[in-house]
Amino acid sequence: MTDVRTSNFAAALAVAPAAGINEKPPVFFLHPDDVMVVGESEFNGIVAIKHPLYDKRVKLPIDRDLSRDLGQNGVGVNVVGLVMDDPRKDATGKVIAVVDGRQRTRALRYLYANAVEGADLPLLPVEVHASMNEDDAIDLSVRLNLKRQDEVTSGIAHKVALLTERG
């Protein structure tokens, strides 16, 4: 019998680049530990704060209310993930980095870590973008974060500076 977690992760990594920019990316339901949030650890030898997908809000305390809400209602908004190279991750040399949805991912990890044995926990819906490059990912992250009220002006300025720096 195939482990559902392993097969979902493998399928997400095997996503072929989308034929067109307007195609909707596939959504996979993954365990929250199957995706990487830049800033929680070193990525591909790059110090996290220098990585273009780094967001300083990853250092905020985990929102336990959000975690409890996710446990009761599930994850209502997809997390956006980008397939990236990381030879240290596993045999595939790929990792799914979170572009948008870092706090939801962290809150769901907290829920899994503190759950009662055998509890029915929600999976993380991840839109997997295989054809997006890092510049597009930064652009998408900035655009999605501009809609949020919790993004501080300095954070937006940092991301816009990264985009400008990268051309």
Image: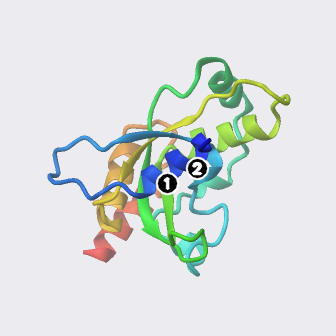
Q: Position of residue 14 (x, y in %)?
A: 39, 57
Nearer to me, 167 or 116:
116
The residue to which callout 2 is attached is: 6
Is 5 situated left or right of 167 in this image? Answer: right
Can residue 52 be seen by looking at this rendering? no
Q: For this view, does 3 lie left or right of residue 12? A: right
Quarter of the figure with residue 74: top right
Q: Residue at x 53, y 47 (%)?
A: 7
| Residue at the (65%, 44%) spot, across then down | 106
Where residue 38 appears, x then y in whole percent?
56, 62
* Residue under pointer 1: 10
Circle 2 residues within 10 Å: few <14, some 14–19, many ≥20: few
Q: Quadrant of the C terminus?
A: bottom left
Horizontal side of residue 60 vs 162, given as left or right: right
Pick out the residue farthest to the front: 1
Kindly tell me whether residue 28 is visible in this rendering: yes
Which numbered tag is attached to residue 85?
A: none
Tag 2 secondary structure: helix
Q: Residues within 10 Å of mark 1 (few under 14, many from 20)?
A: few
The colour scheme is: rainbow
In the rendered image, the vertical position of residue 148 relative to residue 65, given as above or below: below
Kindly check if marks 2 and 1 are in contact, taking CB atoms under 8 A apart as contact: yes
Q: Does 53 sit above or below residue 28? A: below
Above or below, 1 relative to 121 = below
